[in-house]
Image: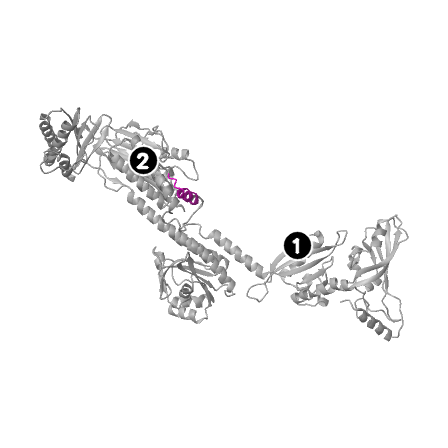
Amino acid sequence: MPMRKQDSARSHGRAEEFGHQQVAPLSAAIEVDARGYITAWGPDAARLLGYQPGDMLGHPVLDLLAGELPASARSYLRAQPGDGWSGPIKARHQGGHRVQLAVQAHPLTDARGGMRWLVVAGTAAEARPGRPGPEPGAPGWPEEELSEEERLLENWTLAQMPIPVAIYNTRARLVGANVAMTHLMGQSVAQMRGLRLREMDSRPIVQEIDLLQEQVIRTGEAIRHEGFDPLSDEPSKPAWAVYLIPVKDAMGVVRGLSAVVFDYTEQHRARRRLTIVNEASVRIGTTLDVSRTAQELADVAVDRFADFVTVDLLDAIYHGQEPMVSPASRAVDFRRIAQQSVLEDCPEASLVAGGADSWPEYSPPAKALAAGRGVRHSTRDEEIRRWTREVPRRGESVHRYGIHSVMAVPLIARGTTLGVAMFYRHRTRDPFDDDDLLLAEEITARAAVCVDNARRYTRERAVSLAIQRSMLPRTGMRQMAASIASRYLPARTAAGVGGDWFDVIRLSGARIALVVGDVVGHGVHAVATMGRLRTAVRTLADIGLPPDELLTHLDDLVLRLDEEEFHTGETEPRTGETEPRPQTGDLVAEERKESTGELGATCLYGVYDPITRTASFASAGHPAPVVVTPGGAVTLPRVPPGPPLGVGGLPFETVDMELPENSTLVLYTDGLLRSAARDPDEGLALLCRALTEPGESAEQMCQSVLDVLTPERGSDDIALLIARTRTLDAASVATRDVPATAATVAEARRWTSRQLTAWGLEEAIFTTELVVSELVTNAIRHASSPIQLRLIHDAGLICEVSDASSTAPHMRRARSFDEGGRGLLLVAQLTQRWGTRQTPHGKVIWAEQSLPPSRENGALSFSA
């Protein structure tokens, strides 16, 4: 440290005590070339500044300066050198302190005409005669007088700075350091001065910084370096940030470097915590599967800060129920759904994944549930010791693997307690601390929301599937028109179950209706809309509307539903809309669309008549059917797509086609063709190739199509309906024209009796005669000619009477003394079902009777 003025006077006084004799000051001669590099350095220079010749030869002479070059010297160097320059200069001694020198610089010219400099430097130091003077920096060496401002800047500020700071010269040797740096290094300035960093400390982090110092001196660019002290005994290793900053003169020449050290352990922990939390937000919740989400929590924790992790759900939650209000007031039943360890196969676990057990009320997990927050323990704590004693396998695991620290954190989301995550350490030497508990609580809270999303999604999906499957056709429908096979595959995406549906409807006259539709959107709302449309289609089909008229009525229904949904949404939220639901990007868009009341759907409706072998189709924005002939030829009939349902104001068109017997009709939703790897056109080409096996049954064909087009489950629902057509031969259909006279009623009964006898249905003669008598009588009395009677024998016995009137009959209640009005009531009582349908030339009244199984004409079964 520089001495104060009174200290300097006392030093001078002590010199006088040694005989009051004045001696010549120390001086030295130095040779410098034209570039400013030292070419000669003698013993006098070594005594003056402490540097040996090997330290200085070939180095810039400006490295000796301890401050700026005087302005007069800079001006002299810029001008034409004359007789020389002289003046005071502050130099840096090898010991680190500054020395005030009186310097004379004389320009010289060598034999080759090159310029050199002879620099003579001297001090004002005193020594007694006959004895060498004190070494520079030794006691008694007079230092320059400093002003108060210089002391503030150069001494007091650096010394009292709480941040470790050190100064190094251009050879990376320490020149000076403050007190904080000496505490950090564990050495005094006197011990470190003149040494390189690698000579002070052998730790790897120190060796690395030493190399970086050389880089800073060489490049003149500052470096920030972060590292840890691997030899520290602290439980959490301290983290250091070292700033190596070059020190340059006014000309930009590097004169040394400064090292500033910051302890950023807390910042590092905070950044580490944020990194883990961010990683958890990315890795946890990638699926809407409860078990998978819990496993992702365990994986993240083990990868980052725990050695063994278990995730347990309350048993009620596991079974899809709501938990008890106070789960920790007694032993709590739970189910293990995930666990992970740094050791293979989780040997520390006392319970296998999927196993059930219970927590006693005093156990850490039960206490965490009761407190609603995380708790941490040492395995030496009484609670842990009691808990492990009760389950020998758990106690054995603690002892064998050296488990020493435990945390229990409840999984709570939206006010619902779902379970507990347990974190253990055995391989990691440090116990869990408060930072670890905070981190565990944060990632567990995020995981709890994901688990709750998955739980809600699973519940909603189960409800949607239950509703949807309840609306799909049932097995065992008896009809002769076609053999049917179908598949429905719900998408496994976050969007939930969609609104795809298909249906097969028995119509009068042994016909069947084939329906495939797709409601825009996913989830319970889409399934509910699908159910309303399916019901409407069945109702409209039952009255015998042709395909184009049926779709027109269905379009009107969707428009009304859309309007009702919109007005309902303005005043009252849809049930469950306020609850958080799992959403991805597509689902968010769909939910936003649904909330505005927009409904949309596509539908393909067709009717197949096995008597005429005619199929009639109309489409509302839905893909047309694919037809496969008995020989295996695949054709794509041109069915105008028409507008989707809900557009309104645009017509639909019916297309009729005659099919050979055993032709195959393939109806599907667009999810069958679409995938991430192909466009719909490529999917249609694959579908056609998959349908070229004519020998396959409808069931086999259905499976073949799915094997080819859906090796992996797509992002949309898939509905597939395949119907292999049949034809009722002429022997199963009998037709008779009926003149509009009273005598023809008796003749119609006799003809019916003969026909049923020919079919071997004698037991049905009495009932059928009564039905024929009533229907023919009504047609003669209330309709117009031509009148026709037709009997059809397929899975049942159908009686049809057609006439030229479009007026539909209806049942009415006849009074006791009325002569008529009981005919249709009698028909309804005698038959399984009856109805009427409109035709282009009038109407048909029909009635169907069921037959004993032994009399059925080979009824086919329907499988879904």
Picture coordinates of residue 641, whole percent (x, y): 36, 31
In the rendered image, residue 588 lying in the magenta stretch gets the answer: yes
Q: Compared with residue 56, is residue 709 higher up or lower down, i.e. above or below?
A: above
Q: Which residue is labeled 1 in the image?
A: 223
User: Would residue 697 appear left or right of 452 to someone viewing this image?
Assistant: left
Q: Work out whether residue 402 can be spotted.
A: no
Tell me the amino acid under the disc marked 2.
Leu
Residue 400 or 829: which is nearer the viewer?
829
Residue for point 81% across, 60% down: 90
Picture coordinates of residue 719, whole percent (x, y): 34, 39
Tag 2 or tag 1, which sits nearer the N-term?
1
Q: How is colour applied across the structure in the image?
A: one colour
Residue 215 is drawn in which quadrant? bottom right
Label 1 crowd bin: few (<14), some (14–19), many (20+), radius 10 Å? some
Tell me the amino acid under the disc marked 1.
Ile
Picture disc at residue 407: none
Quadrant where the C terminus sits is top left
User: Would residue 732 appear left or right of 187 to someone viewing this image?
Assistant: left
Quadrant where the N terminus sits is bottom right
Residue for point 42% across, 47% down: 583
Label 2 crowd bin: few (<14), some (14–19), many (20+), radius 10 Å? many
Point out the stretch of residues depicted in magenta: 587-599
Real-space Cα distance between discs 1 and 2? 74 Å
Q: Work out whether residue 266 can be spotted.
A: yes
Q: Compared with residue 821, is residue 379 higher up or lower down, i.e. above or below?
A: below
Circle 1: element type:
strand
Picture disc at residue 554: 2
